[in-house]
Image (cartoon, helix red, strand yellow):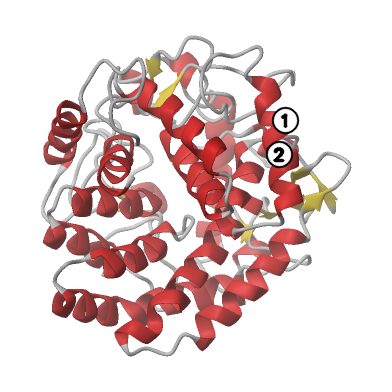
Amino acid sequence: MPTEDVGSRLSDAELRERAIDVLVGNHREGYTVPAVGLYPFQWCWDSGPIALGWAAAGRWNDAWTELTRLMSAQWPSGMVPHIVFWHEDNSYFPGPEIWATGRTPPSSGITQPPLPASAAARLFAGDPDRERAVASLRSLWPGLMAWLSWIERARKGPNGANVIVHPWESGMDNSPSWDQPLSVVPEVSNEHIERRDVATVSEDQRPSQREYRQYLGIVDALRAAGWDTERQPADSPFAVEDPGFTAIAARAAADLASVAASAGLDGREPARLAESMGAGLEALWDDALGWYRPYDILGRCSVGRATSTGLVAIWAGIPDAHTRRMMERVDLWSHSLPGSIPTAQPDDPSFDPIRYWRGPVWVLVNWLVADGLLRAGFTERAARVRTGTRALVEQGFSEYYDPRNSAGIGGQSFSWSAALTLDWLTNG
């Protein structure tokens, strides 16, 4: 983030100190929770940004350990679970007893976008202790490559993009993009749902009860199939090629390929994976809409409108013409909403400015988009996203923000909001 942004209430030093305080407060033994109470365990894709935050704070050992701890829970197939239950905590539902994956440590049975792989590449490039950097990346490399190889092997859809078998795998749980494929998913009916999240955050800011019953319906189906990670798209009542997941996986592979030689590693396979996944991503481009759209495998059709899961394709490196078309649409949104980038199209009937991924602004999405814009040479547009994001986090490191008035909502003292602020403050 630029130093001394116009209108800034806090100096860089003050903002940095507050961000570090959030990470310290959320830190546990070798990992960092996203938010105390609301998310009391280690979440997969959160760990990537969090590791970058620790690095930006100068705590390089904590940064590397964040990733090492996550990867130690990797399944034999190569899948890295989206939640690792490192300790007992009854404040979160669904806990390990619902997942019943039989793993040690206990974990969920699905994954999330492989942002930790990109984080590992960035840590390697930036770590001032080159001996530690090489040793750490070489230690993580087999697991990271096994994860990306599993994604390519077990989660490649008919268009060549990556398949998610649960909205939770996208990281954007209740995005309007999933409404159509979720409409045919049976709701769980044989157990009581203990929505402990709504004890911490207002119910109107969280996914609906019906969505939760459908989420658990998918968990039921995958559990009944024995958590076979090689055939989950066939076992799940929800199977969708996701542009956001695919973009993050493609960029992860490319990032690893870019640093391989410097660590004495072979970058040919990650380079191949990046090319394959990038081609799958491009197959999801809808030229009529001017956006990347998910493809519902079971419904055999493209779904959703302009949401953040298509927008983060910019992170992977896409044709400039596609970037321009999407950002032109995003700029139109700003005429009616003063906040930064909403996660859904404001003029769509499904838009909800305060309900999780149906409209609120997320620091992570802004960070991914700004980074992609910067790499593509859209420097002025990237700077505008960063400036808008700084105005949000100066109010506090919220989970997400109301795009109408920039109010912080959802969980508070949220780790990746703090961590990515630190990354921008340190690395520009």
Of residues 123 and 328, the one nearer the viewer is 328
What x and y, as percent, mark residue 39? Answer: 30, 37
Which mark, by number, is residue 132?
none
Camera-side residue of 413 and 331: 331
x%, y% of residue 2? 34, 34
Label 1 secondary element: helix
Disc 1 crowd, CA 10 A, few/some/many (<14, 14-19, 20+): some
Q: Position of residue 28 (x, y in %)?
A: 13, 47
Q: Would residue 69 appear left or right of 277 to someone viewing this image?
A: left
- Give the labeled residue for mark 2: 326
Of 278 and 376, nearer the camera is 376
Residue 413 rendering spot, x and y as whole percentages:
24, 28
Disc 1 residue type (three-letter): Arg
Task: Tell me what residue is drawn at x 37 percent, y 21 percent.
Answer: 391
Residue 348's image quarter? Answer: top right
Question: Is residue 406 among what the camera can see?
Answer: yes
Q: What is the quadrant of the N terminus in the image?
A: top left
Image disc number at residue 329:
1
- Above or below: residue 292 compared with residue 125: above
Q: Secondary structure at mark 2?
A: helix
The residue shown at (60%, 55%) is 165
Instruction: Give yes or no for contact between labels 1 and 2 (Cβ–Cβ under 8 Å).
Output: yes
Counting other residues with Cα less than 10 Å from the Cα at mark 2, is it few (<14), some (14-19), or many (20 or more)?
Answer: some
